[in-house]
Amino acid sequence: MPSTRSLAQWVEQLERFCAQAMHPDSLLGPYDAARERKRLAVAAGCGLTGIQVAPEHGGFGAPYSIKALIAQRLASLDFGVSMAVINSQNVADDLSQWLPIAVSQRWVPGLLTGDLIGCTALTEPAAGSDFSAITTHAVQTAEGWRLQGEKTWIINAQVADIFLVYAQTEPGSGAAGIAAFVVEAKREGFERSIETFTSAAALSGTGGFRLQGYVAQTGELLHPPGLAFKRALESINGARVYVAAMCVGMLQESLRIAQAYGQRRATFGQALAQHQGWRWALAEAAIDLEAASALVQRAAQAIDEGIPSQDLAAKAKAFATRAAQRHLPVLLHAMGAEGLRDRYPLLRHVAAAQVATLVDGSTEMLLERISKNLKI
């Protein structure tokens, strides 16, 4: 049974995964389900799908800040892979936390070994940020719960085996009627979408599915009505912080690459780094990088300590995503056409920064939340 790891041990395993499964060539091209299953299996072998899962369930029981650190490092190479790994970890953690161990052990060991891949399904074609408006519905029957509806823009949906699906049990009741269920892709009534969603953050495996008469057994009710909405919002709050951390990782790596390039590339008789305007562009990025990193660390610490973190999470995500949007194109441009080469992640990071602003609450939603809690 795994035990807790020191920070140094986590860094060692993280770098092991990056060396084994994050070579630049493996991050290119269209989404390949078989390749991504193998990548997630390597991540699991390094313990990255059991970060917060309690040791008694086979995980490491690490604090949230370790998950944020891992998300940041993985995203420095590829945002999509980071999202895929963290989301499967989240499913293992949720199942081990909220289900009786006799039930959760049907899936948690497979998620920890990488034999199974997990994802969480909230978004629908007509319900994104307005989570309480979901129309996927669940009707209780003698067999359990019969689910009907469609989910879209779901991380890992192209390969996932286990889905945590949120559905409305009482139409018209809004948040109060929402429940969450464990859904298996192999079971009758589950149909995976074949639509290609986006090439931005392609390795996140984003996709969709339909449930048509799918039956979830009584023991597969993860969160009952009255609790599911609250727990989903808690998860979204945590996701805002690790998405902010991912933006820090992308910006940090892009700044490192551009700075190294500026030292070796000569123009008009001197290194790029000797041109004042070029240096100032990197200095601007460095300022916002340090500020974004501090906000992420503060929010992650609050989660670790169990103190209210909603405003901190909103501020961290709003600032970090904006910093990534602002500086990543500038850093790419600072390298000229060289920055477009596939050997560098800058072009992927530019696209991923747009994705980051939309997932787990748009920037506008975050600003509205922050404004309502201003204390001056």
Image (cartoon, rainbow, N blue to C red):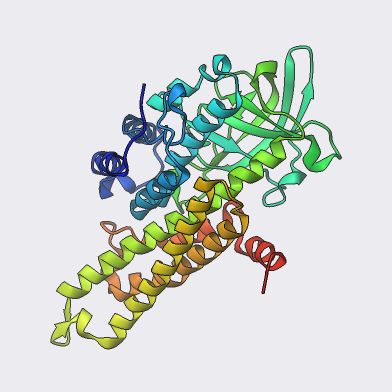
Q: Quadrant of residue 340?
A: bottom left
Return the x and y of residue 241 as percentages of the image width and height: 51, 53
For the point 44% across and 59% down, the residue is 247
Going by the picture, which residue comes out furthest to the top?
142
Return the x and y of residue 58 as percentages of the image width and height: 42, 23
Q: Quadrant of residue 297?
A: bottom left
For the point 67% across and 49% down, the residue is 128
Return the x and y of residue 79 as percentages of the image width and height: 42, 51
The quadrant of the rendering that contains the N terminus is top left
For the point 68% across and 52% down, the residue is 129
The image shows residue 201, relative to residue 374, as above or below, that is: above
The image shows residue 240, relative to residue 332, as above or below, that is: above
Q: Please state which of residues 84 and 314 is positioned toward the viewer in this rendering.
A: 314
Return the x and y of residue 370 as percentages of the image width and height: 65, 65
Going by the picture, which residue comes out furthest to the left?
269
Q: Please state which of residues 58 and 156 is positioned toward the viewer in this rendering.
A: 58
